[in-house]
Image: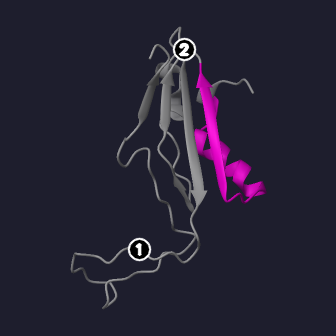
């Protein structure tokens, strides 16, 4: 598929595809010709509700292009967040909180940018 990446938002495209399917796992690979400057939102990765993403991978291509790969795994509804170490009003007495499926978003790209960079010359 060839289009102007500035005309579409990466995460919106993935959400539109997921509206028709409910995969337990999926991956996205995007080739950006011209480098990061042409990538717009496509270079930031995506945080998708109810999915946890694996380590994103960036690979610089000869001629200034960029290959980006991101994999996702569905998170079961009703997942429990870990026990809080902070005493905060609004938390249950045992420190456990249930996350609703509609509000769950376990991001990876922007939280801690642990991106594996690959070089073709290596």
Image position, residue 22 (x, y; %) = 72, 60
Classify residue 34 by image quadrant.
top right
Side of 121 where 30 appears, left or right:
right
- Residue, disc 1: 81
The residue lying at 37 percent from left, 41 percent from top is 113
Q: In this view, does 104 lie above or below 67?
A: below
The residue lying at 58 percent from left, 71 percent from top is 76
Q: Which residue lies most toward the front here?
A: 122
Q: Which residue lies most toward the bottom here?
A: 93
The span picked out in magenta is 7-32
Number of numbered discs on residues: 2
Q: In this view, does 32 lie above or below 42?
A: above
Q: Which residue lies most toward the right here?
A: 20
- Residue, disc 2: 34
- What element does badge 1 sit on? loop
The residue lying at 40 percent from left, 81 percent from top is 97
In the rendered view of the protein, which quadrant contains the N terminus? Answer: top right
Side of 58 where 4 appears, left or right:
right
Q: Residues within 10 Å of mark 2 (few under 14, many from 20)?
A: some
Q: How crowded is mark 1: few (under 14 residues within 10 Å), some or many (20 or more)?
A: few
Image position, residue 108 (x, y; %) = 44, 49
In the rendered view of the protein, which quadrant contains the C terminus? Answer: top left
Magenta stretch encompasses residue 35: no
């Amino acid at each position: 598929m060839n289009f102007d990446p500035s005309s579409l938002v990466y995460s919106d495209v993935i959400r539109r595809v997921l509206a028709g399917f409910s995969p337990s796992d999926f991956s996205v690979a995007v080739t950006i010709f011209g480098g990061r400057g042409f990538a717009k939102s496509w270079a930031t990765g995506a945080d998708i509700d109810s999915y946890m993403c694996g380590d994103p991978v960036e690979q610089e291509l000869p001629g200034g292009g960029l290959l980006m790969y991101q994999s996702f795994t569905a998170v079961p509804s009703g997942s429990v967040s870990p026990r809080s170490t902070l005493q905060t009003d609004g938390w249950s007495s045992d420190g456990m909180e249930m996350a609703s499926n509609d509000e769950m978003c376990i991001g990876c790209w922007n939280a801690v940018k642990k991106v594996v960079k690959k070089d073709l010359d290596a």
